[in-house]
Amino acid sequence: MRVPLSWLREYVDVPADATPEDVLAALVSVGFEEEDVHRFELSGPIVVGEVKEFTPEPQSNGKTIRWCQVDVGAENGGVRGIVCGAGNFFEGDKVVVTLPGSVLPGPFPIAARKTYGHVSDGMIASAKELGLGSEHSGILRLVDLGVDAPVGTDAIALLGLDDIAVEINVTPDRGYALSLRGVAREYSHATGADFRDPGLGHAEAVSRTPAGFPVTVADQAPIRGRDGATEFVARIVRDVDPSRPTPPWMITRLSLAGIRSLGVLIDITNYVMLELGQPIHGYDLDRLQGGITVRRAEAGEKLETLDGQVRTLSAEDLLITDESGPIGLAGVMGGGPTEMSDATRNVLIEAATFDQVSIARTARRHKLPSEASRRFERGVDPLVPYVAAERVASLMVELAGGTLDTELGGSLGSTSRREAIALPSGFVPGLIGVAYTDEEIVSALRLIGCTVEEHEGGWSVTAPSWRHDLSDKWTLAEEVARIEGYDRIPSVLPTPPSGRGLTSAQQGRRRVANALASAGFVETPSFPFTTEEQNALHGSPSGEKLPGVKLANPLDGLAPFLRRSLIPALLQVAHRNVSRGIVDLALFESGTVFLPKPGVQYGTPSVPPLAVRPDAATLTALDASIPPQRRHVAVLLTGHTVAKQPGQPAVAADLTDAVDAVRVLAAAAGLDIELVQAQRAALHPGRTARVLASGTDIGYVGELLPAVSAAADLPGRVLVAELDLDAMLELAQSRVVAASLSGFPAATQDVSLTVPRDVAAGDVRRALIEGGSPLLEGARLVDDYRGAGLAEGSKSLTFALRFRADDRTLTSAEATDAKLAGVAVAAERFGAAIRD
């Protein structure tokens, strides 16, 4: 909301020496957010001049300029020669002259300069150049504004161009502040300055019997049981002259408030809307056919709105209609057939109160936000429509030369009195944590317009008509805190109850993320959206299309599916980094994947009503409409793990680095894992393994196929791994490890076994451990040899073995016996033999 200070001073006593920053500070103290300060960004000398004479001079480029002699007053140098390219003025016209040394918005400094064979000693300005509007077809003639001032008069002060506006952010619950009336009241609350309410004299002082122009409210399908319109005031002004100029003071105020001038009739309706917060619409009375009816639209009905768009209406839309059909979207935008124009002579003024929900839904449904809908959806004062209609009518009489009909037209609903709110004594101090006295509480509530009656044990509080947000004792307590000052509220950290904190699952997820970060990986969270093809490639071992969840309103139409895997997002992040020259990458992400079950239809069958807690059956149906969601963790490596440096060649990332990352993950989760060779559609055969923990498949690790890497625009080898983090943490919680630490030294030996090439090293390792137990503490593969000296089709696997006993120091013979026992099991299962 932009608030011109000259306008604000009409309703509240703002000190003459108050700066915009002072006004903003006062408004911030009562809960508003400071946004900006707006000025016309020009400086003088800018004066009124009179065109004495001019000479048209055609130019070689086809343009005709005027060499003008303009009197700017003796104190400003008398008559000056000025070159002007406009042709819409005449000798004797008074214009705005920007003299050398002045600065126009842009900034655009003015200086005497030679052009078209003359020295132009200044410039005759247009309305756009002064910041008064978008009109740039010709210079600004003061007669068009209805202004006549002596030559040499300061045009900045004359046109109100020295005014300043402050801008504040108005939250949705405080719609009353979208008006000068509301902001002036809040400034009064902040400073104690006298406030003069321009909204006094509401419709209760007028006969409620409709007369004059007929208006009917017939809401056949109210939303949530609330009629679409509860007030509709109509006033008629006849014989207006739409060609009359809007006065400069109104144009400058509207411009500073962010609204451009569109002619005196529309400017008046906008001016009163900003002044009182009540949206106003004016109809060309002569274009109306019969009376006005406020009703719901029929599905498929059409309306051409003021922006020239023909809109197909919904049965929920609230309409303004006459005998010809729809003539406006109530509270949002009027219709083209009845809009006011240069030919309008008789005006019907509408000031109504429309239902907030109806207007909000209509504006969003048609993507048609407007200044009117912005106010209606936040709630307007139901007692101000009559005042606003009277204000518009009086301004049309004053500024457009009209005549006001004495009869009041409209359908005036009975505005019900607001229900009183019980406010117990001691509730406000207990909630806010400040020892407010009863006098402070009552004073604060009365200051904002509440009626407060004292009762035993507290007060009965009736909120003012313009405060729709005050609905219970909690909102009243918030108002007391706001008015008395937020600085009085102490900063106290809450004391957490004992036994609370992170769950074991949360602690596990943090351990995993911290472990990967400590290992040099960078976390890259991403959106959970992908394509059906990527879901198939990375979300299933075989690459087949498994069930996926497709969004009805995706952020990106090319990626409408919820992901089954984290790998596609990591590939996108890697591609983005490589394209920017960062080619050595170690990335990870921990996030949710969506794994719908085959044959199950997901998605909410119907949206539960708002403001009502769903019952158990509805909640169960909602839960059933959500696909299973598992938390996964994935890593990606590409480029080099060690950069080239003096004495050290670059070391490229390979499969062992990805396996090491998996082991880091498992150790952080508290699991022992083993790898089993496997195949996946996106991964290189022979360089892919399933990851098992306690016999349960928890994920995979491997190298992407070159074709998949190339499709992702990634050069070189790309290593990936993806594990089911939820499954890992569940398995870790089910494992209870209680082992004593031996204080005796370990005995180490190596063993090299020849086995057929198709035997997996992991199977041989498990055989050695099984046979060597309980003395064999660990077995680690250190070499896989397949060269000369071996029989055709065989390979040599070398394992480093570590033996230990809990109660003694092992002898070399005991370690050898345990080793040979393991070799015997391997020989029985795979034909393993000790290599000579």
Image: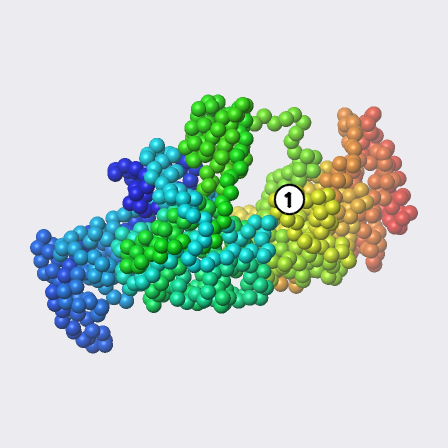
What element does badge 1 sit on?
A: loop
Residues 710 and 814: in front is: 710
Residues 674 and 478: in front is: 478
Q: Is residue 631 left or right of residue 231?
A: right
Q: Is residue 625 left or right of residue 191?
A: right
Q: Which residue is depicted at the point 30% across and 49% down?
A: 39
Query: Which residue matches tag 1?
Result: 612
Q: Is residue 157 left or right of residue 314?
A: left
Can I make out residue 132 in this image? no
Crowd tier of the residue under label 1, counting other residues whose Cα lies within 10 Å: few below 14, some 14–19, many 20 or above: few
Q: How many numbered badges does the structure rendering display?
A: 1
Can I make out residue 144 in this image? yes
Residues 405 and 120: in front is: 405
Q: Is residue 127 left or right of residue 170?
A: left
Q: Which residue is depicted at the point 63% across and 41% down?
A: 513
Q: Residue 149 at x, y = what percent? A: 16, 55
Q: Which residue is depicted at the point 83% across and 40% down?
A: 769
Residues 142 and 75: in front is: 142
Q: Residue 174 at x, y = what percent? A: 46, 42
Residue 754 drawn above or below residue 434: below
Q: Residue 142 at x, y = what percent? A: 21, 60
Residue 805 drawn above or below residue 630: above
Question: Which colour scheme appears in the figure?
Answer: rainbow
Q: Which residue is depicted at the point 21% across and 61% down?
A: 143
Q: Residue 458 at x, y = what percent? A: 52, 25
Residue 452 drawn above or below residue 414: above
| Type of amino acid under label 1 | Val
